[in-house]
Amino acid sequence: MAFTPKEIATKAFNLAEDKWWDCREEVRALEDEQIELALVRSLIWQKSKRHLMAQASVDNVHMYICVIQQSHMSLLRYVAVRATFVISHSPKNLS
């Protein structure tokens, strides 16, 4: 069975087109997989970032508590020194 050049070209074109669509489907599947992986990475990054921010918030709260405690201790020392000064310079102690 002999084919004309037009039939050979048509058959070759159809085979090439079928192959192209098969390859395109494989590429599309790989692209979809890459998109899914990117979404998973993004979710992991967001959760990690939230966790780090929460940890930073806890650390900041701890730091603020330490600052408040130090300020409180400084205030208590100031009050104690001031009270000692007032008591030592009160008219009752001067006489």
Image: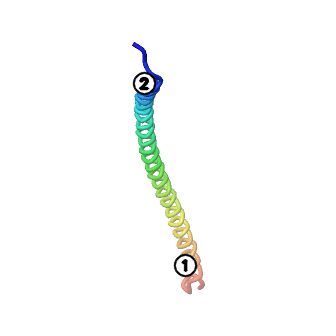
Front residue (pair 65, 88): 65
Residue 22, located in which quarter of the rendered image?
top left
On screen, 32 above or below 71? Answer: above
Q: Nearer the viewer, mark 1 or mark 2?
A: 2
- Identify the element where label 2 is drawn: helix
Query: Does 26 sit left or right of 93 as displayed?
Result: left
User: CA separation, marks 1 and 2?
Assistant: 117 Å
**Which of marks 2 and 1 precedes in the sequence?**
2
**Helix, strand or loop for disc 1:** helix
Q: Amino acid at mark 2?
A: Glu
* Residue 47 x/y as whole percent: 42, 46
Callouts 1 and 2 close, C-beta under 8 Å: no
Residue 32 position (above or below residue 69): above
**Disc 1 target residue:** 87
- At a point 53% along the width and 66% down the height, the residue shown is 71
Q: Residues within 10 Å of mark 1 (few under 14, many from 20)?
A: few
Instruction: Looking at this view, name the residue that lies furthest to the top.
Output: 1
Location of residue 33 by image quarter: top left
Q: Is residue 40 above or below residue 14?
A: below
Dividing the image into 4 quarters, which one contains the C terminus? bottom right
Front-lying residue, 91 or 67 = 67
Q: Quadrant of the N terminus?
A: top left
Image x and y of residue 3, in percent: 43, 19
Residue at image coords 41%, 44%: 43
Q: Is residue 5 above or below residue 51?
A: above
Q: Amino acid at mark 1?
A: Ile
Give the camera-side residue of 10 and 51. 10
Q: Is residue 32 left or right of residue 95?
A: left
> On the image, numbered disc 2 is attached to which residue?
7
Q: How is the image coloured?
A: rainbow
- Could you say where residue 90 lies in the image, as x and y percent from the top left? 56, 84
The percent coordinates of residue 81 (x first, y second) are 57, 72
